[in-house]
């Protein structure tokens, strides 16, 4: 199951070939059960979202009474379909299952972008009442955690905004002006790379260029003169290991992107800063929604 934090926090199940969601008409069926087993989601039938469901007010009704949704992502992908309700079962301790009735979810029947090729399911983890955490109520303790494996791992694997005040590169504080990150910083495992406010990104690139110039490395062009991919590409000598670390100075904690994971998969984005999945490798993030806090620490993820 693909996991991604999305702005609405909606739990979305993408339709696959042969899925009832691809039918031209939608017939309400009796609810059975959904089980999350080994990252797979199984369901046999589902019913329309009832008018009195707590989430019903967030969706519009079609002419035949279906609750419908449309989601547009910052990366350009979109999905639309029907909102349904079902009983979900989660693996618990002692080989038992935790049953949660009346969970609302979206069953997409039209997707644009990479969702059509590589994403089967999306689970929204967010402060919104539409997220899975919101649907679970008190059973979730309003808290969840995750830890991403390295990008070369065989393991197949929302948006919470935190205050970011400054950045250090190679132990050198950039002393970015106050107000550089007016919208805070989002931790989003749905983005492979990271995005920085334009002025912060330009300063990071400038300092890194100074760092590599000391080693007489040759820059190489990638993706054309206007591509961000080519700004910090170098031809390195065999055995070169003098990659700098980077520290993001959050309110109350410092998050270090270690030199052994160096890759400037960072791009510019106006009025938005995102720490993506690549920079979150081997770090355990605990999202405490009740107390509005994010806790993190190093954790080695093994296959």
Image (cartoon, helix red, strand yellow):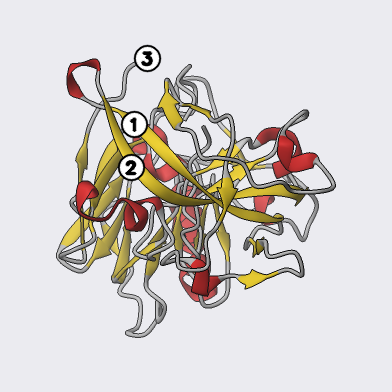
Q: Which of labels 3 and 1 is toward the front?
A: 1
Q: Which residue is mark 3?
A: 303
Q: Which residue is mark 1?
A: 90
Looking at the image, which residue is at 34% across and 58% down?
Answer: 134
Residue nearest the observer in this picture, 242 or 252? 252
Tag 2 or tag 3, which sits nearer the N-term? 2
Could you say whether the residue bearing mark 1 is in a helix, strand or loop? Answer: strand
Tag 1 or tag 2, which sits nearer the N-term? 1
Horizontal relation, residue 238 to residue 141: left or right:
right
Q: Which residue is mark 2?
A: 100
Could you say whether the residue bearing mark 3 is in a helix, strand or loop? Answer: loop
> Tags 2 and 1 in contact by the CB under 8 Å rule?
yes
Q: Which of labels 3 and 2 is toward the front?
A: 2
What mark, if any, has residue 61 been given in the picture? none
Label 2: few (<14), some (14–19) or many (≥20) C-alpha neighbours in 10 Å: some
Looking at the image, which residue is at 20% across and 69% down?
Answer: 251
Looking at the image, which residue is at 53% across and 41% down?
Answer: 216
Give the vertical position of 9 relative to 257 (above or below).
below
Horizontal relation, residue 58 to residue 221: left or right:
left
């Amino acid at each position: 199951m693909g996991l991604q934090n999305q702005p609405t926090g909606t739990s979305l199940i993408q339709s696959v070939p042969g899925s009832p969601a691809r039918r031209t008409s939608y017939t309400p069926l009796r609810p059975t059960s959904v089980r999350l087993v080994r990252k797979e989601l199984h369901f046999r039938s589902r019913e329309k979202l009832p008018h009195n469901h707590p989430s019903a007010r967030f969706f519009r009704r079609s002419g035949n009474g279906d609750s419908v949704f449309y989601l547009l992502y910052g990366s350009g992908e979109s999905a639309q379909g029907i909102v349904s309700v079902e009983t979900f079962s989660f693996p618990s301790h002692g080989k038992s299952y935790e049953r949660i009735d009346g969970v609302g979810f979206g069953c997409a029947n039209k997707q644009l972008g990479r969702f059509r090729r590589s994403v089967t399911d999306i689970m929204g983890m967010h402060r919104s009442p539409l997220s899975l955490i919101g649907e679970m109520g008190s059973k979730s303790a309003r808290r969840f955690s995750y830890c991403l494996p390295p990008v070369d791992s065989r393991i197949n694997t929302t948006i919470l905004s935190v205050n970011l005040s400054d950045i250090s590169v190679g132990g050198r504080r950039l002393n970015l002006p106050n107000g550089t990150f007016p919208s805070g910083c989002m931790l989003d495992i749905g983005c492979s790379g990271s995005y920085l406010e334009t002025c912060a990104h330009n300063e990071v690139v400038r300092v890194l260029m100074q760092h590599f110039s000391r080693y007489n490395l040759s820059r190489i062009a990638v993706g054309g003169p206007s591509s961000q991919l080519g700004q910090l590409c170098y031809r390195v000598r065999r055995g070169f290991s003098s990659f700098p670390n980077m520290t993001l100075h959050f309110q109350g904690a410092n998050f270090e992107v270690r030199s052994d994971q160096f890759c400037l998969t960072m791009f510019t984005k106006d009025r938005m800063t995102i720490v993506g999945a690549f920079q979150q490798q081997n770090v355990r993030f605990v999202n405490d929604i009740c107390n509005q806090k994010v806790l993190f620490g190093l954790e080695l993820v093994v296959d």
